[in-house]
Structures are given as structure tokens and as C-alpha cells.
Amino acid sequence: MDSRNRRRLGIAGAIAGAGAAGIGVAMGVRHFVVGRRRFGPDPEADEPFGKLRGRPLSVPADDGVPLHVEIDEHPGDGAPLTVVFCHGYTLNQDMWHYQRRDLAKSVPGPLRLVFWDQRSHGRSGRSKPLHATIDQTGEDLYAVLCATTRPDEPVLLVGHSMGGMSIMALADGHPELFEDRIAAVALINTSAGRLAEMTLGLPLALARLVQPLAPGVIRGLGRTPRLVDRGRALGADLAFMVTRRMAFADASVSPSVVDFLEQMIRATPIDVIAEFHPALMAHDKSAAIEVIGRVPTLVMVGGRDGLTPPGHGRRMAEAMPGGELIEVTDAGHVLPLEHPGMVTGGLRRLIERIRPVSEERTA
């Protein structure tokens, strides 16, 4: 393969992931790029990203796909509460690194943290392409709940991006859970539908030109996964910069955090990206918002999120009588990594809000 073809392949692989996930892909020659981005010391350079582990559990989905689950137990006095974290498209459970590290420290009482990898992501098994749907991930979440919690235990559901959509699918398929089992919900950088409004941070006129082309391009790349995944590695430097540009808005974000996100995306095969993309574009769970609104809900949005625009979160919060909206003006699509303290703090306050209810349910 000559140098011109290598370059085309690398750029195609990088842009394929950027268009599908909205946040870039590919492995990188990162030392040079990181050094260019930030000449001072990186306070997150020694953070053990991807190394926090819990008690593993394999949960079979209703179609047999093994879902990788990890449980962190934090004992204490008072009413028990389980927090289930649902990650976003092209990521895995490690994206909750800071919340996994810090939440239990700031919340008194017993706390169980449940993390799981969505089908075809992370350590979970591969799905049949026809089952790469949001309705199916909602059923997967139901299987995780049944395997990790008891009917009398209150649960806080936390979802980022596609993880929030999985929660909506759960509410659509199992509304009864939101009457006695689900105590609260946190929806972060997500949407109930109308993702055709997505601009990827591009000017609106340009986004309208690019958006109709994306599905066909992604389907085509998904048919040659080995070739494209190789190209993703060749387009490494571009992928790092695209990831930073499309996922984050804070100019001071740590290069190590960008690198961590890029590695998670790069680990997701291009055919998985292609399989789930149509489901995301067709996602419409507006009717489920009324069900979720039965319980206290926190909605967090990034003011500069080009993937799930802040207006989507505002609409959801307005439709929920008990909904709280937190909008972080200078933030992009990955609030749990870009502004982890705000996300952890929001979850802590939500837990404090529902603790009396939890105690009544377990009395």
C-alpha cells in the first residue's frame, strides 16, 4: 500500500468514528500530540484510568448475549441504595472513572455501585446486528437490574448518552418499575429523540449537508471492519484532535483524559459502530419521559454539546414535574469526564434527596 493510500485509509478510519460516535477514534502517537497541546504538567497524568475494578458478574441477556457487570460494595449504616451506571455509545463502563472513585466517599450510608458494559461494547459479548437496538439495550438493563438488585431495594439509574436512551427504553418497556423500584434517575448528555438536529459542532448549514451522508458512509465502512480499524490506527494524530474538538469544550481539559476517551472509542470495532448508528438516529422515546418523570430526575447538559444538543435536555427537564436541570455552559458531550466534580456532586445531591424515600421503602 503506497503512502497516499495509507493516508486516505487513516483519515477515513478516523472520520468514520468521528461521524458515528461524534468523538473521534483511533490509536495514537500521543506523546507528541499531548506535548503540543499542553506544555505544563498534566495533573491527571498518573490517574489510573481504566484500572478501577469491582466484583465481576456475567449476566445473560434475554437473547443469550453475556453482559459484563461489575459491582462495588460500600457498607455503612442506614438504608441501602443501588446506583446503576449505563455508559454511552462506543464507550464502556470505565467512562465512569471519577464517579466510581469519588461518589461513595461523599455519600454516607451503604451504597452499591453497579457498572455494566452494553452489548458489543467493553467486555460484554457481541450482539447479532439485528439486536443492536435501543429497545434491546433497555431489556439488557432490565436483566442487569434483576441480577443485581432485589425487588424491595431502591435503585438510582444513571445514564450517559446512549445509556440514558437505554433507561428510556426500560421505562417504555417496564413502566411499573418507576412506581416502586426505581427511586430516581440521572440523564446526562442524552436525548429522547430528534437526533437529526445533531450538528457535530459544525455550522448548521454544513451539518445539514453532512448529516444525510453519514448513514451510508458508516454502513459502507462497517462492511470492511478489518481494513477500517487498521486505518483508524494510521489516522491516530487526527483522531486525538477530533476527539478533543468534538467531545470537549473546556480548553483546559487534561490531555490524559482526552487520550483515555480516545482509547475507549478506538477499542469499539467499526462494525459495532455501524450496527448501532441507525438505532441512535431512529431513537424516539419521548413518551417514556412521562414515566421517568414519576420519580426525582436530574438532567445534565453541556452548553456546547453538538451531539445531544442542550435543547434536548431542557425539553426533557421541562416535561418532568420533579426534574432538575443543570446546564454546564462551557462543556461538551462527556460531562462525567470533562466536569466530573459537577456530575458527582449532582448525583450526591440526588441521593440526599431520595434517601428518606429509600428508608421508608426498606423500613
Image (spheres, grey):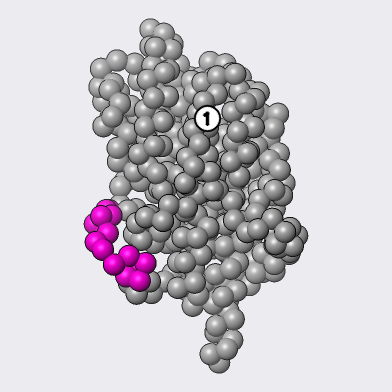
Give x and y (percent) for residue 78: 29, 15
**In the image shown, does 288 or 240 lie closer to the viewer?**
240
Give x and y (percent) for residue 355: 38, 16
User: Is 100 drawn above or below residue 321 in the view shown?
Assistant: below
- Three-letter residue code for mark 1: Leu
The quadrant in which the C terminus is found is top left
Residue hosting label 1? 325
**In the image shown, does 318 or 220 lie closer to the viewer?**
318
Image point (70%, 48%), residue name? 197
Magenta-highlighted stretch: main secondary structure?
loop
Image point (53%, 90%), residue name? 3
Taking the image as shown, residue 109 lies to the left or right of residue 242, namely left
Q: Secondary structure at mark 1?
A: strand
Question: Is 45 a magenta residue?
Answer: yes
Q: Which residues are magenta?
A: 34-48
Judge whether residue 304 can be spotted in this image. yes
The quadrant in which the N terminus is found is bottom right
Judge whether residue 136 can be spotted in this image. no
User: Is 10 drawn above or below residue 274 in the view shown?
Assistant: below
